[in-house]
């Protein structure tokens, strides 16, 4: 089940206990919650100024650990998210400016959806400095997320292999293999899921498989029967299943649930059969996102 904490009726951890009970009663095994860190002014947790913090609107860190323990004791594993980029005025960037390249910004190249590409605006990383420092910037992030969640979805996984930099408009290699090798020595088997949606090169797939990370697939982008993936009916960034397929949506929900994927994730809006009025986020737009909420559990 995919349901952000912000989509609980109160938008707080306190409603999580009833939701865990509901998950158990309905035989779910995983609850994916997206990032817990503070959100930006538009509601997004993927542009957070404190990537290892908790949004105080949800509750406290102690409250989260109590809820996670309750879920784990009931047989529910928590899947959290770790954003890749942080804004230039984030705590990390202000504390360790030597690890950031403020001259170059984040974005995505032109594709069939956006002919001019995308400009996200985060500073790029100074990978040479990060590597020279033993990758401690990312190791501290990994340590936090591994403690907070049972499984961690690495947002923008292809960024660990190469990044698109602006204004140069070119791909630049990233020492992701070295980073994950060091991380594995620190933490053992890494409980990571690669968010590898979109146009993924063989080298990105090779990196994922080298470290045995599960990949990602969404039925709306094409049916997939691989075993080493997390298979989604929809995500927080896509149409709802019904919004995409109309009256045939249940057919595709069934395809996800019967697939051989190691983990199948269905957002609550798909379980409820809601149309695109319940769509959670529309990338590239600024209004009406990150607001959908359950009325009751």
Image: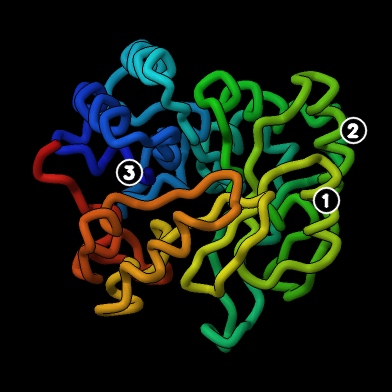
Quickly name the residue at label 1: 207
Work out how far the residue at label 2 is from the one at label 1, CA to CA, in angstroms: 21 Å
Image quarter (top left, top right, bottom left or bottom right) of the C terminus: top left
| Residue at the extreme front | 258
- Could you say whether the residue bearing mark 3 is in a helix, strand or loop? loop
Work out how far the residue at label 3 is from the one at label 1, CA to CA, in angstroms: 29 Å
Residue 243 appears anywhere in the view: yes
Q: Residue at x 52, y 84 (%)?
A: 113
Q: Say if 185 sits above or below 240 in the image.
A: above
- Which one is in front in this view, the residue at disc 2 or the one at disc 1? 1
Q: Residue at x 61, y 83 (%)?
A: 111
Q: Say if 275 sits above or below 50 in the image.
A: below
Looking at the image, residue 85 sits to the left or right of residue 245; the answer is right
Q: Few, some or many C-alpha atoms within 10 Å of disc 1 (few <14, some 14-19, many ≥20)? A: some
For the rendered model, the colour scheme is rainbow
Q: How many marks?
A: 3
Quickly name the residue at label 2: 132
- When asked about the image quadrant of residue 1, the answer is top left
Quickly name the residue at label 3: 3
């Amino acid at each position: 089940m995919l349901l952000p904490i912000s989509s609980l009726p109160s938008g707080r951890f306190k409603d999580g206990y009833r939701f865990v009970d509901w998950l158990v009663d309905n035989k779910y095994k995983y609850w994916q919650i997206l990032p817990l860190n503070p959100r930006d002014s538009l509601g997004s947790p993927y542009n957070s100024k404190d990537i290892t913090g908790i949004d105080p609107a949800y509750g406290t860190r102690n409250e989260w650990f109590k809820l996670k323990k309750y879920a784990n004791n009931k047989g529910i594993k928590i899947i959290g998210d770790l954003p890749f980029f942080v804004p230039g005025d984030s705590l990390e960037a202000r504390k360790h400016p030597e690890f950031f390249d403020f001259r170059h910004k984040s974005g995505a190249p032109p594709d069939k959806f956006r002919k001019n590409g995308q400009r996200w605006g985060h500073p790029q990383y100074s990978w040479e400095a990060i590597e020279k420092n033993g990758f401690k910037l990312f190791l501290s992030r990994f340590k936090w997320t591994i403690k907070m969640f049972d499984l961690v979805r690495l947002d923008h996984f292809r960024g660990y292999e190469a990044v698109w930099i602006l204004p140069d408009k070119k791909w630049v290699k990233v020492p992701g293999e070295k980073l994950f090798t060091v991380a594995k020595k620190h933490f053992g088997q890494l409980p990571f899921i690669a968010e590898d949606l979109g146009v993924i090169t063989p080298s990105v797939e090779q990196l994922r498989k080298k470290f045995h990370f599960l990949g990602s697939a969404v039925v709306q982008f094409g049916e997939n029967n691989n075993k080493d993936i997390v298979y989604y009916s929809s995500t927080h960034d896509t149409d709802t299943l019904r919004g995409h397929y109309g009256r045939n949506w249940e057919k595709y929900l069934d395809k996800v649930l019967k697939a051989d994927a190691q983990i199948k994730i269905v957002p609550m809006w798909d379980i409820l059969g809601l149309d695109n009025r319940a769509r959670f986020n529309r990338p590239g737009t600024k209004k009406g996102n990150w607001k959908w909420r359950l009325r009751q559990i």
